Amino acid sequence: MMRAQDQAVLDENAAALGVPRKQLMESSGNAVARVVEDVADDGDDVAVLAGRGNNGGDGFVAARFLRDYDVTVHLLGRAETITTDIARANWDALQRAELDAHAVRDSTALELGDPDVLVDAMLGTGVTGAPREPEATAVRQVNDCTATVVAVDVPSGVDADTGEAAGVAVDADHVVTFHETKPGLADVDAAVTVADIGIPEAAETFVGRGDLLRLSRDPTSHKGDHGEVLVVGGGPYTGAPALAAQSAFRAGADLVRVACPKSVASEVQGYEEGIITRPFAGQMLRPGHVDELLDRAVEHDTVVFGPGLGNADGTLTAVREFLAEYDGRAVVDADALQVVPEVDTDATLLCTPHQGELRQIGGETSEDWRERRALVADFAADVGHTLLVKGADDVVSDGETTRVNRTGNPGMTVGGTGDVLAGAAGALLCTQTPVDAAAIAAYANGRAGDIVVDERGHGLIASDLFDALPTALWGER
């Protein structure tokens, strides 16, 4: 099963790997044409109803492959409003080939005639909500005709993720969907064909720029909508929680607070004016602080637990007690990782060990990323939490989905870059699934390091990543 957004991510990652969207559209349209050939007789009348996006582009391509049929293409809307370059190019190809393709500028002008087969290429997986005009009228005409209906990717008007229809929806006989089936198709009473269109396995394995598509923001957002993060750290070290907090800001969190010993609170706050400290008594985390931390944690979307805490016995006992009682989302980093395998918790944990820390908590690793991928996936399944194992190639897994990140460089071996990664992961975990948060954080952290090294050469310090992190997350698309 693949959600609509997952498909968009894969398409973009495939393009980044050198498989252009134009090639994918050619394969998609060919797959649609093959299904039409299966249900049509030679010489049948085939009508293609096409929208102005890439779903319509798939329909344009299908029309070119249906040479043995009497094909008419109805574009719903003006040709100059086709929304993507590749769909427009395929529309232009129909014009140059002098195929029967025309624009329907007004819903009252749509005349389908009496086709034997009708291709629904109006609204794809990226469109939700009730169809507007002229699509709404077109959907009703499709449902009133007696033609065999072949829908492209998903019947127009049906939500690809839920199967629900907010308004009118095409009653399809066949659906041709691509790469993997979509959740919403389980409730559609139609024959479903899943077509391989040539998306490489690497587009799913490796984190890429397509993953950044998950970071869209509602233009009407308010403060707090993109996450409030509580960093629990500090005591023996002050820089680590400050790095994590600043990184969480740069990765998009709206509010970041640091719970740290009172003895270092002023120093931590001094790193960045926007950091709000919530000091607790003493010089390090102790079991007596756990109830206070739990009360603070429930006021936040995510907790980043571990940067700079140290590994004193009392501190680790406090971490155990906190995790045993906590049922929210948390990034667990640094010394706090030691207690994870032994704690029974209802929390959703994203653990960020480097390979040495992974071994310390019972996992196995390898210098070969393929072997490490399998080992990390097995260990993630055993511990029941999502792992982001840092290395030259980062590996992310929850035991079911496993991703590999290849950004980053040897200049990032400097201390503190892991704290930056933990903070970014905490911000992203506010709005993303644990696997997606980990994958995007690893990609952006490494990409930020690449940007810095490209500009300045080696010798970076962890705080150099801050200015590059927003560019790595939002500046590449």
Image: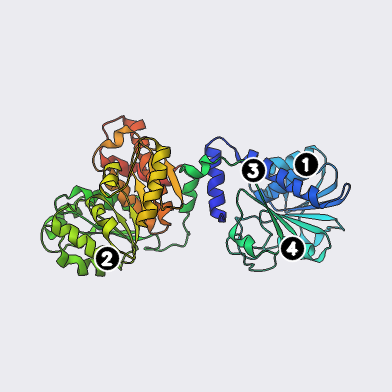
In the image, is residue 302 above or below residue 405? below
* Kind of residue at badge 3: Ile
**Quarter of the rendering containing residue 138:** bottom right
Q: Closer to the N terminus: mark 4 or mark 1?
A: 1
- Kindly identify the residue that appears in the image at 31 percent across and 41 percent down: 465
* Disc number lying in front (1 or 2): 2
Q: For numbered disc 4, what is the local secondary structure?
A: helix
Q: Point out residue 65 in the picture as x, y percentages from the top left corner.
A: 77, 41
Q: Point out residue 145 in the picture as x, y percentages from the top left corner.
A: 83, 63
Q: For numbered disc 2, what is the local secondary structure?
A: helix
* Kind of residue at badge 4: Val
Give the spatial CA distance, label 1 vs label 3: 17 Å
What residue would you read off at disc 3?
197
**Residues at marks 2 and 3 touching, judged by CB atoms closer than 8 Å:** no
- Kindly identify the residue that appears in the image at 57 percent across and 45 percent down: 11
- The numbered dot on residue 139 is 4
Q: Point out residue 187 in the picture as x, y percentages from the top left corner.
A: 64, 65
Q: Closer to the N terminus: mark 2 or mark 4?
A: 4
What residue would you read off at disc 2?
324
